[in-house]
Image (spheres, grey):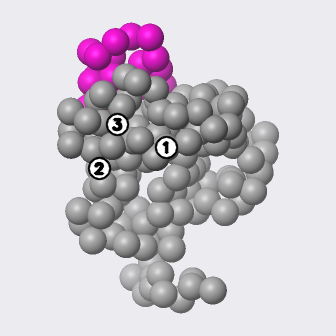
Amino acid sequence: MFRVLFVCTGNTCRSPMAETIARTGARQQGLDWLQVESAGTMAAPGNPASAGLADEASRHGLSVEEHVSRLLTAEMVAEADFIVGMSVSHLLAVLDLSPDAPLALVTHFLNAADTRHGQDVDDPIGGGGPAYESTWLLLEECVERLIEQVQRELPADYDPEDEIE
């Protein structure tokens, strides 16, 4: 199993949005070995996904009804093969937990010509439907490229069955 952990602040908007997009994309591509999760650097554990995210996911035929926010922990960081932050501040929080963590800013995966490349993903909370739609489209593009990169960079002899305990 290859574990990708998406990180934002409250774990109710951006990171669960990326998690939902990545999980759906992995399932559609038959990448059962790709496990995606999310957490928040300042999350109050147990909160549902934001109403705006629930509405946006529904527009795409998906559900975030089962999402429950989680506070980022050192254990989560240690278990992840790759950590993707929504902003530089999220990456810094991960580094506080583990200076050697394998991480990247989510927009790192956009084409270099894209003006958003290497920038934070704005938090859509309180911004209404258009803010959630814009964030969804951006994360959809980033996550697609992330999955492509993970597939390219895995060793040719990678076998997720070798990792089953």
Residue 152 against residue 92 in the figure, above or below: below
Element on which disc 3 rests: helix
Q: Which residue is mark 1?
A: 67
Q: Are marks 3 and 2 in contact (CB under 8 Å)?
A: no
> Which badge, 3 or 2, is on the more N-terminal residue?
3
Looking at the picture, which amino acid does disc 2 mark? Glu
Asked whether 117 or 57 is in front, the reply is 57
Q: Which residue is mark 3?
A: 139
Tell me where residue 123 appears, x and y as whole percent: 47, 20
Residue at position x 61%, y 59% in the image: 80
Q: Are marks 1 and 2 in contact (CB under 8 Å)?
A: no
Can the viewer see residue 153 in this picture?
no
Residue at position x 30%, y 54% in the image: 24
Q: Which residue is mark 2?
A: 144
Q: Residues within 10 Å of mark 1 (few under 14, many from 20)?
A: some
Can the viewer see residue 42 in this picture?
yes
Cα separation between marks 1 and 3: 18 Å
Residue 147 lies in quadrant? bottom left
Q: Are marks 1 and 3 in contact (CB under 8 Å)?
A: no
Q: Which mark is residue 31?
A: none
Report the span colored magenta.
Answer: 120-137
Residue at position x 52%, y 34% in the image: 48
Residue at position x 57%, y 85% in the image: 164
Cα separation between marks 3 and 2: 8 Å
Answer whether residue 40 is magenta in the image: no
Looking at the picture, which amino acid does disc 3 mark? Leu
Disc nearest the viewer among 1 and 2: 1
